[in-house]
Amino acid sequence: MPKRGLAALAITTVALILLLSFKTPDEIPGSTTGTVAVVEPVTGTTIVPGVTAAPTATAAPTASGAPKATATPAPTAASGGTTKVDGPVVETRYGPVQVELVVSGGKIKDVVALQLPSGRRSGQISNYSAPILHDEAVQAQSANIDLVSGATYTSDGYAQSLQAAIDQAGIG
């Protein structure tokens, strides 16, 4: 009897540990549940992750697994001497990140997040970090911005896309 009780206790303990360590997937491919819209505070533009007008670039992870951006689109001139430059799409562990840089008079006037990671937790993190990253970029007038705690991959992708847009715009 003691052997059976000990075996039952061991099996129950292992099952409990496995149950408590189970992590649900952040996003199920092809699923629309959990999609979160991101509203840019300055421009009022609503961004629905997964819905893009036209991807302008692609990205590939480096050998170290860090996100890396490739290819950049041409800047477009807007009214009033304002130039808009789309940064490349940077693929991160949790989803794509892309920003649009708005430049006027050689200064960064606005940064609009065109794509951010979506899904359950990723969407929450994007909603939290987007306004912080925006404010950091406009204040710093560069891509040399502080990472948002808990949003390291998103922050890194944001900074990479922003730096590529800054380089293409010829400022900084």
Image (spheres, helix red, strand yellow):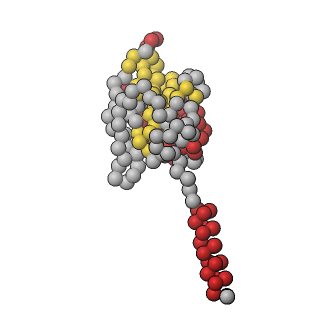
The quadrant in which residue 37 appears is top right
Where residue 7 appears, x then y in whole percent? Answer: 61, 81
Residue located at (47% from left, 30% from top): 51
Q: Nearer the viewer, residue 147 or 106?
A: 147
Q: Quadrant of the C terminus?
A: top left
Residue located at (38% from left, 19% from top): 76
**Left or right: 153 as drawn, with respect to 39:** left
Where residue 99 appears, x then y in whole percent? Answer: 46, 31
The answer to whether any part of residue 33 appears in the image is: yes
Residue located at (45% from left, 37% from top): 97
**Left or right: 136 as drawn, with respect to 65:** right
Q: Nearer the viewer, residue 13 or 55?
A: 13
Where residue 23 appears, x then y in whole percent? Answer: 56, 56
- Is 17 drawn above or below residue 159 in the view shown? below
Residue located at (46% from left, 43% from top): 29
Looking at the image, how many numbered discs can be counted on the residues? 0
The quadrant in which residue 133 appears is top right
Where residue 10 appears, x then y in whole percent? Answer: 62, 77
Q: Nearer the viewer, residue 169 or 128?
A: 128
Q: Quadrant of the N terminus?
A: bottom right
Q: Nearer the viewer, residue 108 or 16?
A: 16
- Is 23 drawn above or below residue 154 in the view shown? below
**Left or right: 53 as drawn, with respect to 70:** right
The quadrant in which residue 161 appears is top left
The answer to whether any part of residue 163 appears in the image is: no
Q: Residue furthest left?
A: 71
